Image: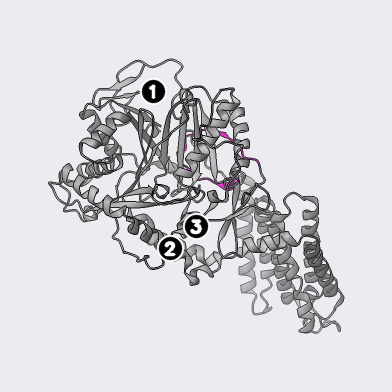
């Protein structure tokens, strides 16, 4: 069944989306961004026109968050969406009141188009679809002769119900939902930046070189970078300090997994899970090789279908719990908040998101220079990493809520020591 | 021209002086007309309360304290907590200003809350100022007249908003339903003999039933949809 966007449109929040509205604030914003750098300066008015056209194609994003008796929901938003100029905030809080009720932002600066999205609405894969559609429409409006080649959705397609489905609950297995308790993770400490500022440093390397380096160790790129991240954290934060109590907590890297690649679904909403590496590093002589073996093993274990379904079902079971379901929303809010503060956040040292390679049709390629991803960083996860690549530009972006840049430095020096050229971008937050 | 950090061996396209990784001075010349990749930080001005707000706030707190002190000091002569009347009114004033006027909540929601609080405040005033021996009117003006009339006017107000702002009427329907159901309260109080003068309660009830039937007959789908949305579990 197809559905046009109208006043009747409304959506339930998907399983993973339900938690975010309750636990988000100006510090833990749960916002992530995806940006495209074009080869020409962005025209604000055309971008606005492109957005208006695309939003009627994607009713899923033309919504506001409303509270119901038992759950909040997304309701059709009749107010206009306005593109803005990029400010210094990186993944700052999206306040619906200042944003006509919308839960995402589209910004421009010089040659960049940036989307920042509240995680309740969609995950990385969903936003990439939206971004591609906007860029395509924008380039058409600037008079470029381009074709979608089935890689980019256009405004002429009609939305399908499949895009809205909460895929998590479709794969729910009642018999495979065991909850496995976890230990609190090691936290990267540092001097907090003032005024909820977020520092951003990205490094671009050659995709080809990156693949070569990972292949040489017989690893995927994500595995290699996760192992390198653990090693960097170990070298800069823990080595020779293992006797300190807080350093004995396991270092856990949270790596989101796009479940669309493992299970058949075309949803635009949240459909991702994670694998997690877990290693107590309070020793003086851990080698990179040792970490690689462990990461590889833990990735393999975490990526099996049964394990992915277990993690999915664990969350869905929580939502299906009869007591929780019929608790009025204003009480449930607190239950979710307390639960998340006790468990959710503190189980990860940092998150490392690999959004992956982004493809544009050949006719569009001359107009696109590169892409950047970014996630918020908060009080507990003081440093996060996100990766995205386009053609030969493989971009690793660190976002941090602390002043120190030691981990970024050592991480990129690892590549320069291997003889790989690294190009850095920074928002120079430390200058203020 | 890209700048270069000799220590980190990285390239960077910026007019800033230092390497973001190691804070060393970068090698290379500034590029003329370069637009930095990320905008410069502009400090958010901390919201400073305007002086008027400070003065009113100060006067409010001071008067509340003075009222309470006088009331408690004279409790022997007059054993009533009369100070709750002005204090309640002061609080109501603040709620009207901050929630009723300045907030950006849904207007119908604001009306419902303000009406509800006003009724509560007036009942409080009525209770505190009630003198049993006075004439032969046994009822309470707050229950008899104010509650039904306030509910009826709130009903009318939200209905008119819906009639005027046709586009977004779905946003208001749930509040209209709430106040319609609240309007049934006076009729219950009539049966409990708390309300002595019946006709205002009857008027409020009649109006509520009229509006309810009107929505049910002319907007049946909106009502169904709204209830489905708000009550999905």
Circle 1 Cα neighbour tier, 10 Å, few/some/many (<14 / 14–19 / ≥20): many
Q: Residue B30 location in percent, x, y?
A: 38, 17
Can marks 1 and 2 be said to lie on one chain?
no
- Residue where numbered disc 3 is placed: A18
Q: Along the line of sight, which residue is nearer the eye, B32 or A137?
A: A137
| Distance Cα–Cα, label 3 vs label 2 | 14 Å
Foreground mark, 3 or 1? 3
What predominant SS class does the magenta segment belong to?
loop
Whether residue A227 sits left or right of residue B128 in the image: it is left
Contact check, label 1 and label 2, Cβ < 8 Å: no
In the picture of the structure, the residue carrying the numbered disc 1 is B14
- Contact, mark 3 vs mark 2 (Cβ under 8 Å): no
Is residue B211 visible in the rendered image? The answer is yes
Q: Point out residue A6 in the picture as x, y percentages from the top left corner.
A: 67, 48
Q: Position of residue A43 (x, y in %)?
A: 57, 25
Give the answer, above or below, for where A227 lies relative to B40: below
Q: Is residue B120 above or below residue B156?
A: below
Residue A85 drawn in magenta: yes
Quarter-of-image position of residue A203: top left
Chain to which the residue tagged by mark 2 belongs: A
Asked if badges 3 and 2 are on one and the same chain, I answer yes
Please provide the residue range marked out in magenta: A80-97
Residue where numbered disc 2 is placed: A338
- Where disc 1 sits, the SS reads loop
Q: Residue at x 37, y 48 (%)?
A: A256
In the image, A18 versus A284, the foreground residue is A18
In front: label 3 or label 2: 3
Instruction: Please check the rendered image and state whether residue B7 is part of the magenta-colored stretch, yes or no.
Output: no
Whichever of labels 3 and 2 marks the residue nearer the N terminus, that label is 3
Output the chain of dot 3. A
**Percent position (x, y) of residue A190?**
31, 44
């Amino acid at each position: 069944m197809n559905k046009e966007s109208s006043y009747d449109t409304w959506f339930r929040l998907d399983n993973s989306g339900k938690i975010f509205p309750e636990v988000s604030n100006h510090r833990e914003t749960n916002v992530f961004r995806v940006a495209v750098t074009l080869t020409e300066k962005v025209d604000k008015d055309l971008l606005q026109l492109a957005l208006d056209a695309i939003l009627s194609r994607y009713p899923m994003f033309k919504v506001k968050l409303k509270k119901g008796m038992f759950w909040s929901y997304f309701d059709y938003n009749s107010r206009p969406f306005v593109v803005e100029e990029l400010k210094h905030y990186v993944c700052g809080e999206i306040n619906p009141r200042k944003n006509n009720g919308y839960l995402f932002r589209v910004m421009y600066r010089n040659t960049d188009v940036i989307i920042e999205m509240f995680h309740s609405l969609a995950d990385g894969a969903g936003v990439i679809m939206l971004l591609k559609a906007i860029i395509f429409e924008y380039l058409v409006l600037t008079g470029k002769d381009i074709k979608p080649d089935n890689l980019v959705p256009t405004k002429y397609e009609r939305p399908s119900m499949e895009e809205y489905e909460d895929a998590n609950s479709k794969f729910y297995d009642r018999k495979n939902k065991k909850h496995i308790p976890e230990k609190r993770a090691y936290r990267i400490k540092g001097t907090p930046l003032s005024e909820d500022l977020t520092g951003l440093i990205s490094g671009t390397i050659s995709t080809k070189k990156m693949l070569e380096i990972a292949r040489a160790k017989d690893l995927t790129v994500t595995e290699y970078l996760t192992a390198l991240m653990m090693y960097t954290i170990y070298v800069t934060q823990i080595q020779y300090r293992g006797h300190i109590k807080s350093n004995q907590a396991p270092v856990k890297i949270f790596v989101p997994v796009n479940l669309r690649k493992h299970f058949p679904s075309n949803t635009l909403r949240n459909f991702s899970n994670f694998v997690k590496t877990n290693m107590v590093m309070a020793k003086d002589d851990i080698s990179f090789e040792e970490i690689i073996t462990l990461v590889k093993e833990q990735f393999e274990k975490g990526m099996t279908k049964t394990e992915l379904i277990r993690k999915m079902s664990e969350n869905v079971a929580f939502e299906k719990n009869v007591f929780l379901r019929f608790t009025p929303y204003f009480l449930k809010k607190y239950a979710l908040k307390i639960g998340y503060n006790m468990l959710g956040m503190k189980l990860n040292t940092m998150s490392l998101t690999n959004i992956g390679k982004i493809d544009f049709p050949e006719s569009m390629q001359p107009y696109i220079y590169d892409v950047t991803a970014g996630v918020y960083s908060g009080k507990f996860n003081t440093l996060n990493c996100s990766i995205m690549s386009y053609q030969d530009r493989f971009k690793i972006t660190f976002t941090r809520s602390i002043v120190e840049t030691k981990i970024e430095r050592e991480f990129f020096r690892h590549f320069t020591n291997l003889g790989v050229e690294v190009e850095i971008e920074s928002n120079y937050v430390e200058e203020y | 021209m890209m700048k270069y950090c000799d220590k980190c061996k990285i390239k960077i396209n910026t007019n800033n002086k230092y390497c973001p990784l190691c804070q060393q001075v970068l090698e290379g010349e500034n590029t003329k007309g370069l637009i930095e990749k990320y905008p410069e930080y502009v400090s958010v001005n901390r919201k400073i309360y305007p002086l008027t707000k400070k003065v009113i706030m100060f006067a409010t707190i001071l008067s509340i304290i003075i009222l309470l002190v006088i009331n408690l000091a004279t409790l022997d002569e007059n054993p009533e907590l009369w100070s709750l009347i002005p204090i309640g009114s002061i609080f109501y004033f603040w709620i009207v200003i901050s929630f009723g006027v300045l907030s950006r909540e849904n207007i119908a929601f604001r009306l419902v809350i303000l009406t509800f609080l006003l009724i509560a405040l007036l009942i409080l005033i009525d209770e505190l100022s009630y003198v049993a021996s006075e004439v032969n009117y046994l009822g309470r003006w707050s229950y008899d007249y104010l509650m039904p009339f306030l509910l009826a006017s709130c009903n009318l107000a939200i209905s008119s908003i819906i009639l005027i702002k046709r586009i977004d009427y779905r946003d208001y329907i749930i509040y209209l339903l709430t106040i319609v159901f609240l309007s049934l309260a006076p009729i219950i109080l009539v049966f409990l003999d708390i309300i002595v003068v019946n006709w205002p309660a009857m008027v409020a009830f009649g109006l509520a039933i009229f509006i309810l039937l009107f929505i049910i007959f002319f907007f049946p789908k909106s009502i169904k949809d709204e209830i489905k949305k708000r009550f999905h579990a």
